[in-house]
């Protein structure tokens, strides 16, 4: 161990000599730096070392490098040496080296891995970022947070849509029963589609040629860097997924992908997978709770994307729910209030028409239903929904009067 420590310390001599030559640190400070580094090296190489020892070592080096940069700016006119020298990059290189030694010794320490990635991203070290994600995902393939972090990095920083999708699919190979992963995957696809539609609307990109040019500028589908992990066969449920890199050319009216059919496919496969993994699958209530919880979570995600045809997407989800559980109060209310969900109270004809259609739908359901207890529960919930969302004590306009009249008829 002593020889290893001596070797590491000897490698630092040229850097320290350069710092002293530039007059950024004096002899006394150089001696102190060597003493601290020697102490840290003994700590991290000892048998009783902990991940926190590496983190403290890294923190010391970061503070030291920050001080070097500040002095370099302050004394730049007094430094005779021009150009880049060893002390300009040795600090960053050493920090990466300590991180690498730390994660190799403690591969389960997420604090070390997280710090490593954060530092690499801060310094724009693309190669290290990709290598770190790849190693971490191979070591911890069931760590959902790592997969989501990698997919987010590809989408938001690199604009690499294909790579981000691939990461979600690989994540589902190991975590296909995770509601969080399915939610994030669907949110990612909605995010991508909404940004695409907003951009096309804003710049008037109508022709396919314009759209292709826009995609080439705004999506970097390069494979120079790729977060890789050993391939494994897809689960049976995931084999139902279509090829996700489908064409996004055209309009909502002409292209089902832009309308959201891919999102609905992801929802269907995700729901089937999660229900299959339900522990007490024979218990009807447990199965309903899982189904409703997952479905309503997706509905709340869809709520956030105004540019999408949200009624179209929700209609598919609610139909799936009501086909299987036609007597559940929560689902009935969702169905009866669907065409009001995104409608704000106003005095225009559209609001009044949708309101009347919704109430007509309620009356049609009420006339057909034979369970009196359920009818009473639905009646109370439906009135509560209308009152909570559209009636205020301060309002006394014509629409409010009409709404109150309609509620009385209910």
Image (cartoon, helix red, strand yellow):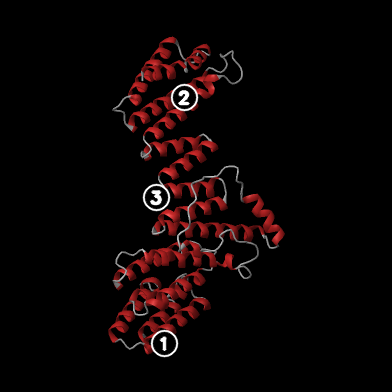
Q: Quadrant of residue 408?
A: bottom left
311 or 125, nearer to the observer: 125
Q: Give the labeled residue for mark 2.
A: 65
Q: Quadrant of the C terminus?
A: bottom left
- Mark found first going from the N terminus, 1 or 3: 3
Give the total number of marks visible in the rendering: 3
Residue 124 in view here? no
Per the rendering, the mark at residue 78 is none
Q: Secondary structure at mark 2?
A: helix
Against 100, residue 75 (above or below) is above
- Marks 1, 3: nearer the viewer: 3
- Marks 1, 2: nearer the viewer: 2
Residue at the far top: name it. Answer: 27
Q: Quadrant of residue 111?
A: top left
Q: Give the labeled residue for mark 1.
A: 364
The answer to whether mark 3 and mark 2 are in CB contact below 8 A is no
Residue 242 in view here? yes
- Mark found first going from the N terminus, 1 or 2: 2
What x and y, as percent, mark residue 221?
A: 61, 49
Q: Which residue is at a point 33% across and 65% down the rendered structure image?
A: 278
Q: Which residue is at a point 54% across and 37% down the rendered structure image?
A: 127
Rounded to the nearest whole Å, what is the CA distance between mark 1 and mark 2?
Answer: 73 Å
361 or 151, nearer to the observer: 151
Rounded to the nearest whole Å, what is the CA distance between mark 3 and mark 2?
Answer: 36 Å
- Mark found first going from the N terminus, 3 or 2: 2
Per the rendering, the mark at residue 142 is 3
């Amino acid at each position: 161990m002593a020889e290893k420590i001596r070797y590491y310390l000897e490698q630092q001599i040229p850097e320290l000599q350069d710092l002293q030559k530039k007059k950024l640190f004096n002899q006394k400070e150089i001696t102190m730096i060597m003493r601290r580094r020697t102490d840290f090296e003994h700590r991290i190489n000892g048998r009783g070392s902990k991940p926190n020892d590496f983190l403290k070592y890294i923190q010391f080096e970061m503070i030291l490098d920050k001080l070097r940069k500040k002095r370099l700016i302050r004394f730049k006119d007094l430094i005779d040496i021009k150009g880049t020298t060893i002390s300009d990059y040795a600090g960053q290189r050493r920090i990466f080296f300590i991180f690498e030694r730390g994660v190799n010794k403690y591969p389960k320490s997420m604090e070390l891995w997280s710090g490593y990635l954060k530092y690499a991203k801060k310094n724009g070290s693309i190669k290290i970022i990709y290598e770190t994600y790849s190693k971490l995902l191979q070591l911890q393939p069931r760590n959902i947070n790592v997969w989501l972090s990698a997919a987010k990095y590809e989408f938001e920083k690199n604009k690499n849509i294909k790579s981000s999708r691939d990461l979600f699919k690989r994540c589902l190979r190991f975590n296909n029963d995770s509601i969080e992963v399915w939610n994030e995957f669907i949110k990612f696809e909605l995010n991508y589609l909404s940004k695409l539609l907003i951009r096309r609307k804003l710049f008037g990109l109508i022709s396919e040629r314009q759209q292709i040019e826009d995609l080439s500028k705004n999506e970097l589908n390069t494979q120079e860097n790729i977060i890789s992990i050993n391939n494994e066969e897809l689960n049976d449920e995931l084999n139902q997924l279509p090829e996700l890199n489908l064409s996004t050319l055209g309009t909502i009216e002409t292209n089902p992908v832009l309308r959201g059919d891919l999102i609905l496919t992801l929802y269907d496969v995700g729901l089937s997978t999660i229900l299959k993994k339900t522990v007490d699958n024979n218990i009807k209530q447990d199965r309903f709770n899982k189904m409703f919880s997952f479905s309503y979570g997706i509905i709340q995600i869809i709520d956030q994307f105004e540019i999408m045809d949200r009624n179209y997407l929700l209609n598919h989800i609610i139909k799936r729910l009501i086909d299987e559980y036609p007597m559940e109060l929560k689902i009935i209310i969702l169905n009866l209030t669907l065409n009001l969900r995104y409608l704000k109270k106003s005095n225009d004809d559209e609001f009044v028409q949708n309101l009347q259609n919704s109430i007509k739908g309620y009356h049609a359901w009420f006339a057909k239903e034979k369970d009196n207890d359920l009818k009473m529960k639905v009646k109370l919930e439906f009135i509560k929904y209308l009152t909570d969302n559209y009636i205020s004590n301060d309002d006394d306009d014509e629409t409010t009067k009409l709404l109150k009249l309609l509620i009385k008829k209910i």
